[in-house]
Image: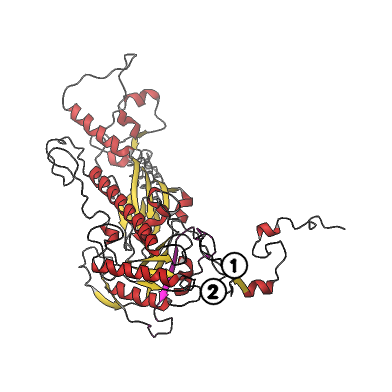
Amino acid sequence: MACRGSRGPRVFLPFLYPSIFGPNGSHISRFNLAVHGRRHASTDPSAPAQDDIEYATTRLNPSPDDYSMPNFADKAKLTLHAGPGGHGCISFLREAYMADGPPNGGDGGHGGSIYIQAVHSETSLHKLARRKFARAGRGKSGQGSAKGGQRGEDVILSVPVGTVVREISRDDPEAVEEYLTKKRRKRRREPVAVEMDEDGEPIEDPDRKKWILYPGMSSSERKRVELPDLPIRDRLLKQPKAPVYLDLSRPTPRPILLAAGGLGGLGNPHFVSKNLRKPMFATRGENAMTMEIEMELKLLADVGLVGLPNAGKSTLLRAVTNSRARVGNWAFTTLQPNIGTVVLDNNKGRPVVKSFKVTAEDVSDDPWAEPAEPELQQRTKFTIADIPGLIEGAHLDRGLGIAFLRHVERAGVLAFVIDLGNGNAVEALKALWLEVGLYAQMREEEEQQREREAAIDWSASAGETMQSDFWTSSGVAKTTTAGAGLHIAGKPWFVVATKGDLPGAQENFAELRDYLAAVTRGDEPHPSGVEGAWIKDCAAIPVSAINGHGVDRVIHWTVGLLDG
């Protein structure tokens, strides 16, 4: 019997698996595939051809399918739904020889709240990006025999350290009702006419919707029942003021409240009075608020690799760390940031280079405890972030640059990776610094605009005085252009000149080295054009990452810059 899935002609196999078949479609044996591999070609069309140079397949020059690409997302939007409170219960005691006992209805449970917490165990926002919604538990309604309802389950959102949370919008029905209730109570102090509808009947009190009446009451009794004023209750959790903005650059020992759950309703025993022994009503639970937030992850790496496409950043990351980043001889091999860890002692207990760092991280659970004093600890490792390559106009959302440039904002040291076999190295460095500087200025303008909007006073006395630092006496917003982009240009940086084994690389490196020496002396301006930028010791380190040559100098130089 013939197989149903019989083999057909191998027409598409060379297209789907180019690493297994040769250029003419001939099959390559597994032995030859594992032993030989091609060197990463330069993106410069004028560069000498490297197709004839073959190297053994190693960890620094792996096969096309030898890489690891974990799930990663650095942006997420979530709609938060806090839990509504449970309703109060209308109940009366029923026992032997007591046919009509006192009220014993239980209170409703409070709704669940939504918190956020920054932890080291999370490295990406991809879980929350797929989730889209976060709903806290609903409070259970009260029961007879004075049984209170169960409280709604809280939700804690665990995010990586370095996440920035911004509020987009919110819908808080209870805040609106509280404002309207205060206005109605002020009106009751003055004699006002009863409002009538189109049919000439009095309009029902809006607060009546917040009450639950006994189910056994007739319609006439429902109309005649007199309801007291809603009690003023103290909230267990205070809802943060709008707009919410959190910069979780450090791990949070306790979760931070984002959306507070609604209060549970009150049972009928709360309304017993001298004139009312049997209250036939209870209150409903509060409605929950809804909030839409946007989360943005900025990786907290010690070193950020910045370079053009196919400059050798991923190969360099493989050479200095145990990362399995994807490498190839085409542009935009890296589609998402990769993080590698450099272990200084190589897991042998003998540090290659001694380095120390100052730690003053306070993780105490006691909010009244005194802050911990800075301590000097020996550095055993540091992290490197490899972001996708930048092209011209990356700050204007061209290519993949602007989507990942935020990850270099928090890096302590910037390493610009320049391909010595891809045109003039000095011009490539200037192009990279131009994109990074323009992006930094754009981010600073967005931050100033956000602070100006947050400084607007929406109270009744708004407009009488302007005491904000963002507005002049004439009402014109202040602008600060001095030092724009300095929060990135002021970082220590150096250049890693890759592919130093290619022909013509020595002359290109010599020109780059002379240019950096002129920048250090002050004869040439900073490549970004920002005044006051870091120019203490601008250096270039030539390496051949695919052969592992010169990468040790990169580690030593980086440690020196981190120590300051």
Q: Give the range drawn in magenta.
A: 324-352
Q: What is the number of the mark on residue 304?
A: none
Are the residues at dot 2 and dot 1 in contact (C-beta closer than 8 Å)? Answer: no
- Judged from the image, the secondary structure of the residue bearing numbered disc 2 is loop
Q: Is residue 501 above or below residue 102?
A: below
Q: Could you tell whether 278 is left or right of 70 in the image?
A: left
Whole-percent x and y of residue 77? 41, 48
Q: What is the number of the mark on residue 59?
A: 2
Q: What is the number of the mark on residue 51?
A: 1
- The part of the image, by quadrant, that contains residue 86 is top left
Give the main secondary structure, helix, strand or loop, of the magenta stretch.
loop
Of circles 2 and 1, the one toward us is: 1
Task: Give the Cα distance between marks 2 and 1.
Answer: 20 Å
Residue kind at label 2, given as amino acid type:
Arg
Q: Is residue 227 above or below residue 202?
A: below
Q: Which of 42 and 349 is in front in this view?
A: 42
Q: Could you tell whether 271 is left or right of 330 in the image?
A: left
| Lower position in the chain sequence, tag 2 or tag 1 | 1
Q: Could you tell whether 42 is left or right of 371 in the image?
A: right
Q: In this view, does 197 lie above or below 431?
A: above
Q: Which residue is drawn at 26% across and 77% down?
A: 376
Q: Nearer the viewer, residue 361 or 495?
A: 495
Whole-percent x and y of residue 124? 44, 59
Q: Nearer the viewer, residue 240 or 91?
A: 240
- Judged from the image, the secondary structure of the residue bearing numbered disc 1 is loop
Q: Which residue is drawn at 26% across and 32% down?
A: 180
Residue that lies at the very extreme toward the top in this rendered image: 199
